[in-house]
Image (cartoon, rainbow, N blue to C red):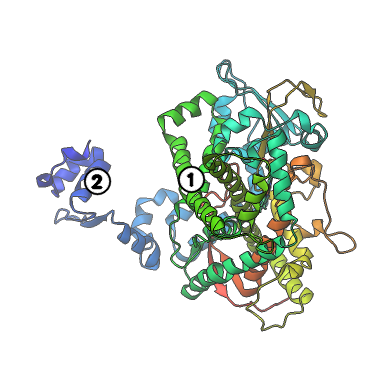
């Protein structure tokens, strides 16, 4: 290590710093480590070279954030960097603000991303390595990359991987192909063994299985969600998490005026809500102080790693898995966190059930699942526990990230479209006949059904940012797609839902504009688009089972926040994560103001 070569007694001589100039960072590191993070440097008496060096996080926070106004770039900086003139790096105060606002607003303009995307071209097919270099180079923004390539190739593109890896695939965002694969020729496109291998963490849950086991899962889940008491249970759960978690936490942020990550809040909210609904257990990850709950954070690591398994050659991620390194290490840690959360909950519930006779009026989902599965299986307790673990983990995956990601993108889009926010607030007030000063309100399911414009704004959010960005299929038999492309058995097909929402050929010339009106019929009701055009909730026999539940939950949360608070989104660069679930890569930093802003025209 270079630092070790600098010993304490060599510190702090003006001559030494000149000598150490060629390795100044290592030198500074050695000195700062030795002096516990802050060091006063004394320059020669004839030169103004005294300085304080620091790497102490508390000082950094103080200088760059808390007391920011006291530490401008200043004249000295401008003198050194005179070559940069009046550019953003070199200026302070008003001019800096103008630069920053302009650059920020251009970079977050809806068409900026497209500009970037259109500059990306179809990857070169190199000898031996195929198109892999292009894919790896763009892996950090894989959804925008796929969009650019698919728009250029009119919706279907054959990707050639290296000769040594089984990475050839056909990517498509053509609605006719989507309809064919997900609905018309559904039986030829099961999830299959390759999907199960990639998503091994999901075990025998609904997302991962085909045929009879999938039908059992689907029948059971559907019948429970259609149960007369389900919506009552759902509403009660959402209200409890709002009252005990969301509102107290938001109130504290509003009172303190501090900056916080709204995406983190929504992830905690949906995690607590789905755990409570399925397992009758509230982990309270959304409480004041935002405690660290390992299972809650494990979802992010898991979806990231699962995306990389789609991009890397199979041998690579399998080797990483075996060595427990990189994203695979995080995935196996996530796996442990899920098991440590789920198994104790399952055992506790099983014990509770043994102690009491279940009456029909005691409808809770956990009990209902056990009853349903007991009808078709008579296995030992371990495998029942494993099966329940898989079932609940799949439903938690289904219910946590999808909904929280949509809510986060929704509030970001509202901040960029304040007129839409105003119209939603007006709709809430008019449709629900609320008084002006009525601020503390829990919205019920019947009320949310009247909020058509809000519904349109959520659909529009999902058009741009479908939570499940891609799907992956392997045909059983040779097939010809409506686009004319031939696919052989086991050829990898990737369906890009993310691309579909941004295609002019599907949504028209204004496809990049955020227009909730798109979703409202002439009669003023919700306009339903065919699922092969808008596949955010999938299409065909495997259509999402939680669509209605998701809308209820999102509308209650969105209405509660819009009606009681005003969210100010900070200037920041926003980009989608390169993950199966399209979240915001760096979260969404916001401030909150309590109270309903005046409705100006
Ligand atoms: C905005 C929210 C949501 C979106 C965008 C969404 C989207 C999707 C998509 C695209 C699929 C197909 C995935 C695949 O086959 O690989 C799916 C399946 C599914 N979703 Fe959702 N989902 C949402 C919320 C929920 C919620 C809250 C639940 C309830 C727990 C849920 C339950 C399910 C289930 C059980 C399936 C599996 C269906 C099957 O394979 O037969 N979803 N969802």
CA separation in Å, label 1 and label 2: 41 Å
Give the position of the C terminus as an image quadrant: bottom right
Which element is circle 1 on? helix
Give the position of the N terminus as an image quadrant: top left
Q: Is residue 199 left or right of residue 233?
A: left
Q: Nearer the viewer, residue 431 or 281?
A: 281
> Is residue 253 in view?
yes
Q: Up-down: is 531 above or below 328? A: below
Classed neighbour count for the residue bearing mark 1: other residues with Cα under 10 Å, few (<14), some (14–19), many (≥20): some
The CB of the residue at mark 2 lies under 8 Å from ligand 1: no
Q: Nearer the viewer, residue 93 or 334?
A: 334
> Is residue 578 in view?
no
Residue holding disc 1: 339
Classed neighbour count for the residue bearing mark 2: other residues with Cα under 10 Å, few (<14), some (14–19), many (≥20): some
Residue 209 place in picture, x, y as percent:
66, 36
Q: Quadrant of residue 355?
A: bottom right
Residue 192 place in picture, x, y as percent:
66, 29
Q: Specify the farthest residue to the right.
A: 523
Residue holding disc 2: 29
Which element is circle 2 on? helix
Q: Nearer the viewer, residue 586 or 544?
A: 544
Q: Nearer the viewer, mark 1 or mark 2?
A: 1
Residue 517 place in picture, x, y as percent:
80, 60
């Amino acid at each position: 290590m270079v630092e070790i070569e600098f010993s304490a007694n060599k510190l702090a001589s003006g001559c030494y710093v000149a000598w150490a100039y060629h390795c100044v960072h290592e030198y500074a590191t050695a000195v700062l480590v030795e002096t516990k993070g802050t060091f006063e440097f004394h320059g020669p008496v004839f030169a103004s070279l005294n300085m304080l060096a620091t790497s102490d996080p508390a000082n950094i926070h103080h200088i760059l954030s808390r007391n920011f106004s006291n530490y401008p770039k200043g004249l000295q900086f401008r003198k050194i960097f005179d070559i940069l003139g009046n550019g953003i790096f070199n200026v302070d105060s008003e001019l800096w603000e103008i630069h920053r606002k302009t650059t920020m607003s251009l970079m977050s303009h809806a068409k900026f991303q497209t500009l970037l995307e259109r500059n990306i071209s179809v990857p070169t097919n190199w000898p031996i390595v195929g198109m892999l270099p292009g894919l790896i180079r763009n892996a950090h923004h894989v959804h925008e990359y796929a969009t650019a390539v698919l728009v250029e190739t009119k919706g279907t593109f054959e990707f050639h991987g290296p000769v040594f890896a089984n990475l050839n695939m056909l990517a498509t965002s053509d609605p006719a192909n989507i309809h064919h694969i997900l609905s018309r020729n559904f039986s030829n496109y099961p999830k299959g063994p390759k999907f199960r291998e990639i998503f091994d963490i999901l075990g025998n849950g609904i997302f991962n299985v085909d045929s009879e086991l999938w039908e059992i899962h689907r029948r059971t889940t559907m019948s429970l969600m259609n149960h007369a008491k389900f919506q009552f249970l759902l509403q009660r759960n959402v209200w409890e998490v709002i009252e005990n978690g969301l509102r107290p936490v938001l109130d504290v942020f509003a009172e303190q005026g501090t900056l916080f990550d709204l995406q983190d809040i929504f992830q905690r909210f949906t995690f607590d809500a789905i755990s409570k609904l399925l397992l009758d257990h509230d982990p309270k990850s959304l409480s004041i102080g935002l405690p660290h709950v390992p299972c809650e954070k494990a979802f992010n690591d898991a979806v990231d790693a699962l995306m990389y398994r789609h991009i890397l050659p199979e041998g690579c991620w399998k080797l990483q898995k075996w060595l427990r390194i990189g994203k695979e290490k995080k995935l196996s840690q996530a796996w442990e966190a899920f098991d440590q959360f789920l198994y104790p909950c399952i055992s506790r519930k099983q014990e509770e059930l043994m102690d009491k006779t279940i009456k029909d009026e005691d409808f809770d989902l956990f009990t209902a699942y056990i009853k349903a599965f007991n009808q078709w299986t008579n296995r030992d307790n371990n495998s029942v526990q494993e099966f329940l673990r898989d079932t609940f983990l799949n439903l938690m995956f289904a219910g946590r990230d999808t909904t929280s990601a949509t809510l986060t993108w929704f509030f970001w889009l509202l901040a960029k479209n304040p007129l839409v926010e105003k119209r939603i607030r007006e709709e809430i007030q008019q449709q629900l006949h609320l008084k002006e000063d009525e601020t503390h309100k829990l919205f019920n399911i019947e009320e949310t059904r009247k909020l058509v414009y809000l519904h349109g704004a959520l659909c529009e959010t999902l058009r741009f940012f479908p939570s499940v960005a891609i799907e992956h299929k392997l045909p059983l038999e040779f097939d010809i797609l409506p686009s004319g492309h031939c696919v052989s058995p086991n050829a990898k097909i990737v369906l890009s839902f993310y691309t579909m929402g941004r295609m002019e050929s599907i949504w028209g010339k204004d496809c990049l504009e955020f227009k909730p009106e798109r979703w409202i019929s002439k009669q003023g009701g919700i306009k339903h688009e065919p699922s092969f055009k808008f596949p955010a909730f999938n299409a065909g026999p495997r259509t999402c089972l939680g669509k209605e539940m998701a809308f209820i939950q999102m509308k209650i949360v969105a209405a509660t926040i819009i009606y009681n608070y005003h969210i100010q989104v900070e200037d920041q660069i926003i980009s989608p994560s390169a993950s199966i679930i399209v979240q915001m890569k760096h979260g969404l930093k916001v401030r909150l103001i309590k109270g309903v802003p005046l409705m100006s025209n």
